[in-house]
């Protein structure tokens, strides 16, 4: 350490500056880490990492899409529910594991002239007689808060399970997570995908004391891929029997809208690749995550704080002991390592926001360089001012305290440095002139015998000696001198 600092005073000043920066940067990194990072920056990194960590689509998840082709063939939406009944009957013959009909059925079908609703009856019979089917329920505000709005009783009773289809949108509008259970008054409804995966009962009664709509079991979705990632068959193709029954055997079949004009599409972490994703495709990703046991868990605040503080702590210790170049390289390496570790943790199912550590690392080195440079300048400035106040060997034209009238600190230090440099030049000239006026040939050498100065008599005398080149000796001594 002593070789890096010119004096004990400068070492103490550098240590004081380092301690102040040390405390400030650790508090910054730890505080931001405890708050789970910097919001939008971390969300952007999260989206990039999730998009980069896709996985193959499961072969046992099939989407029966209400797409533009089906709408062109079957007419405008809504379709008669008798068509849905025919679809359920045809799918049930193939014996899939479960069928998810993601179509809102909270209102009865429009009655015919005789007041009958054969579509509702036909669909109820198909649901009751076929493979385990899940229907969606929505929520509505009745003035006293949110309440569940299930399908009409005839259809709800025929379905194997009901599931909510709510998706959690973050403050930037992107869907990254979902609550697997929602409910009110102790009645909990599973998510649509969870009901498909687990064939859970319609609802479970627990504590009925709460009157507010509650949500629990938040799951951050480990998206398998972007829009179009899962196998998709047009609704009309299945209805017409254009797809072999065994194609759906032992599969999870999700029926829902993908046509741009009628679908509920949302931005997701995958949206940068293919735009918004339809709700049925998001449900397919949720189902795949549940079946694969792939979900993303947010790190606890203390875990993110520790993750943020550790690289900053290493960097700050390195700044004090390493050279500027090595310290810069170490800081850059730690920054890249922090981002890489965050990505690897996400691949393992844990999201640790890295922006707190990245910001602290990016800010700490410039601050440390600035404070260290400020300390060095302060030391040199004080040394020059103190030198300026010492008795001078040669007479001065201006009084010694003239520079004290300068109020600006920087100008005072520059003036003191100029005066010191001028005095060194004057002193060297004085020594050279004094040596040159000596009557005898005189040489000034260092402890190793190298010639540093020679007067004119020495030049005249030694020039007559062919074996000795005084000019070359003086040039060699100047080139080896640390002062140049």
Image (spheres, rainbow, N blue to C red):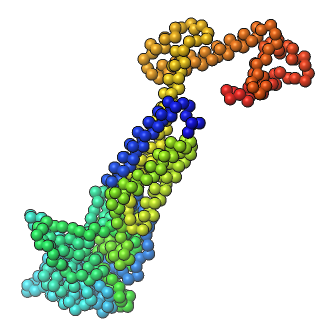
Q: Is residue 20 above or below residue 155?
A: above
Residue 49: which quarter of the image? bottom left
Query: In the image, 135: left or right of 356?
Result: left
Q: Is residue 124 visible?
A: yes
- Residue 453: where, in percent of width, then height? 76, 18
Q: Is residue 56 above or below residue 35?
A: below
Q: Is residue 240 above or below residue 217?
A: below
Q: Which residue lies at the image location 74% right of the left edge and 24% below the top edge? A: 446
Q: Which residue lies at the image location 22% right of the left edge and 92% below the top edge? A: 129
Query: In the image, 424: left or right of 196?
Result: right
Depth order, front residue of 195/245: 195
How many numbered discs sit on the rendered protein?
0
Residue 478: which quarter of the image? top right
- Residue 225: where, in percent of width, then height? 40, 70
Q: Which residue lies at the image location 36% right of the left edge and 67% below the top edge? A: 296
Quadrant that contains the C terminus? top right
Q: Is residue 316 above or below residue 194?
A: above
Q: Is residue 240 visible?
A: no
Depth order, front residue of 420/451: 451
Depth order, front residue of 9/314: 9
């Amino acid at each position: 350490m002593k070789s890096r600092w010119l004096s004990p005073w400068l070492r103490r000043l550098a240590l004081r500056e380092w301690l102040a920066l040390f405390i400030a940067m650790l508090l910054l990194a730890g505080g931001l880490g405890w708050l789970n990072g910097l919001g939008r920056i971390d969300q952007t990194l999260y989206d990039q990492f999730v998009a980069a960590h896709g996985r193959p689509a499961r072969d046992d998840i099939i989407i029966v899409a209400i797409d533009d082709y089906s709408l062109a063939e079957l007419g405008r939406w809504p379709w008669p529910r008798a068509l849905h009944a025919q679809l359920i009957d045809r799918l049930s013959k193939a014996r899939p594991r479960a069928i998810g009909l993601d179509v809102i059925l909270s209102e009865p079908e429009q009655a015919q002239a005789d007041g009958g609703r054969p579509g509702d009856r036909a669909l109820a019979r198909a649901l009751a007689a076929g493979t385990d089917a899940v229907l969606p329920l929505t929520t509505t505000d009745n003035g006293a808060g949110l309440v569940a709005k299930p399908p009409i009783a005839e259809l709800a009773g025929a379905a194997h399970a009901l599931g909510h289809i709510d998706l959690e949108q973050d403050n930037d509008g992107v869907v990254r997570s979902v609550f697997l259970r929602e409910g009110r008054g102790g009645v909990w409804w599973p998510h649509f995908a969870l009901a498909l995966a687990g064939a859970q009962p319609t609802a479970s009664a627990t504590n009925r004391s709460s009157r507010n709509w509650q949500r629990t079991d938040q799951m951050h979705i480990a998206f398998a891929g972007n829009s179009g990632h899962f196998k998709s068959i047009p609704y009309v193709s299945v209805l017409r029997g254009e797809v072999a029954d065994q194609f759906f055997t032992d599969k999870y079949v999700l029926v829902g809208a993908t046509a741009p004009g009628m679908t509920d599409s949302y931005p997701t972490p995958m949206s940068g690749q293919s735009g918004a994703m339809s709700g049925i495709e998001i449900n397919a990703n949720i189902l795949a995550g549940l079946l694969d046991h792939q979900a993303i868990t947010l790190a606890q605040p203390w875990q993110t704080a520790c993750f943020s503080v550790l690289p900053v702590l290493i960097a700050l210790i390195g700044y004090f002991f390493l050279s500027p170049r090595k310290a810069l390289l170490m800081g850059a390496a730690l920054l890249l390592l922090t981002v890489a570790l965050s990505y690897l943790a996400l691949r393992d199912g844990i999201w640790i926001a890295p922006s707190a550590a990245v910001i602290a690392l990016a800010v700490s080195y410039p601050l440390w360089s600035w404070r260290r440079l400020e300390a060095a300048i302060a030391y040199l400035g004080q040394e020059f001012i103190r030198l300026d106040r010492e008795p001078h060997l040669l007479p001065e034209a201006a009084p010694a305290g003239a520079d004290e009238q300068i109020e600006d600190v920087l100008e005072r230090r520059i003036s003191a440095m100029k005066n010191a440099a001028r005095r060194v030049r004057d002193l060297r000239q004085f020594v050279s002139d004094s040596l040159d006026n000596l009557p005898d040939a005189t040489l000034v050498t260092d402890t190793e015998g190298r010639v540093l100065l020679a007067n004119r008599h020495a030049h005249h005398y030694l020039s007559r000696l062919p074996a000795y080149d005084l000019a070359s000796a003086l040039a060699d001594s100047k080139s080896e001198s640390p002062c140049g």
